[in-house]
Image (cartoon, grey):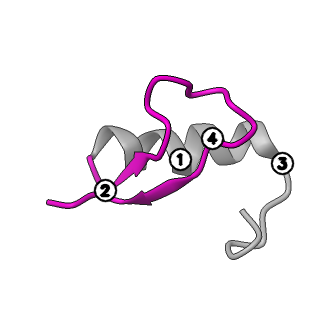
Amino acid sequence: MKKLGLSHRPTFRQNYLQPALDAGLIERTLPDKPNSRLQKYRRSGG
């Protein structure tokens, strides 16, 4: 969010994060705990 200059979390999730996850561009580091405060994201391996 910081790198994109965004501060509104719901908009970020809806417009950027979820589409990237759906497209397989990124993946969660903790896939079993999507709402964890420790959740991070990384580029997909494929």
Q: Residues within 10 Å of mark 1 (few under 14, many from 20)?
A: some
Q: Nearer the viewer, mark 3 or mark 2?
A: 2
Say which quarter of the image contains residue 6: bottom right
Q: Give residue 25's mark.
A: 2
Residue 17, label in figure: 1
Q: Identify the residue position indicated by label 4 in the image.
A: 13
Mark 2, residues whose alpha carbon is within 10 Å: few (<14), some, or many (≥20)?
A: some
Mark 2 and mark 1 in contact? Answer it, CB < 8 Å: no
Instruction: Indicate the amino acid at tag 3.
Output: His
Task: Point out residue 14 in the picture as x, y percentages from the top left corner.
Answer: 59, 37
Question: SS for tag 4?
Answer: helix
Q: Which mark is residue 8?
A: 3
Q: Position of 4 compared to 45: left or right?
A: right
Query: Splitting the image into 4 quarters, where does residue 35 fall?
Result: top right
Are the residues tagged 3 and 2 within 8 Å (C-beta)? Answer: no
User: What percent of the width, then of the height, locates residue 1?
Assistant: 71, 62
Specify whether residue 40 is painted magenta.
yes
State the extent of the magenta-drawn residues as a range. 24-46
Q: Residue at x 43, y 31 (%)?
A: 31
Of labels 2 and 4, earlier in sequence is 4
Assign a secondary structure to mark 3.
loop
Name the residue: 69% across, 76% down. 3
Tell me the CA gap for discs 3 and 2.
Answer: 22 Å
